[in-house]
Amino acid sequence: MWKKSELRAAPAPLEGPVVGTIIGGTVIWFALFLAQIPFYSWFADHDLTKWVWTCLAGGGLGLLGIWYVRRRDAAIKRDAALKQTAANDPA
């Protein structure tokens, strides 16, 4: 099926603006939640309140995600600074 010569190494993972992406997604979830609040009775009449609470849960999980990616980003920057310091200090 695959010849050995056709196999290639996997590319390096892409690093983008992770913190901004998570913040943007969290804002969208909370905005959707707030947009649905005035129509809660309609959702309740049609047994669709899970959509309202799903948006609130998405916003709450987004807050956890923001906390996580900010700590991850800080750890990556700390590690890079330590490696830079170690490279500059031959002792």
Image (cartoon, rainbow, N blue to C red):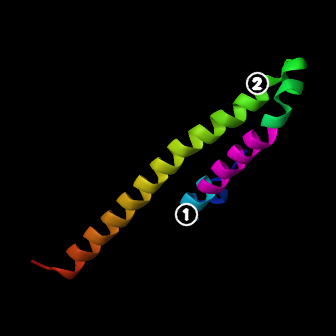
- How far across and how far down the image is residue 16, in percent? 58, 64
Please tell me whether residue 21 is drawn above or below residue 77 in the rendered image.
Answer: above
Q: CA–CA distance between discs 2 and 1?
A: 34 Å
- Dot 2 lies on which element? helix
Measuring 30% from the left and 71% from the top, which residue is drawn there? 81
Residue linked to disc 2: 50
Mark 2 or mark 1, whichever is nearer to me:
2
- Dot 1 lies on which element? loop
In the image, the segment drawn in magenta is: 23-36
Please tell me whether residue 30 belongs to the stretch shown in magenta: yes
Measuring 57% from the left and 38% from the top, which residue is drawn there? 61
Residue linked to disc 1: 15
Q: Amino acid at mark 1?
A: Glu
Name the side, left or right, on which 51 lies relative to 45.
left
Of 77 and 86, the residue lying toward us:
77
Q: Amino acid at mark 2?
A: Lys
Say which label, 2 or 1, has the lower sequence index: 1
Residue 37 sits in which quadrant? top right
- How far across and how far down the image is residue 5, in percent? 63, 59
**Mark 2 burial class by Cα count in 10 Å: few <14, some 14-19, many 20+:** few
Q: Is residue 4 visible?
A: yes
Of 12 and 29, the residue lying toward us:
29
Most prominent secondary structure in the magenta stretch?
A: helix
- How far across and how far down the image is residue 70, in percent? 45, 56
Measuring 67% from the left and 58% from the top, which residue is drawn there? 6
**Residue that lies at the very extreme toward the left in this rendered image:** 91
Q: Quadrant of the N terminus?
A: top right
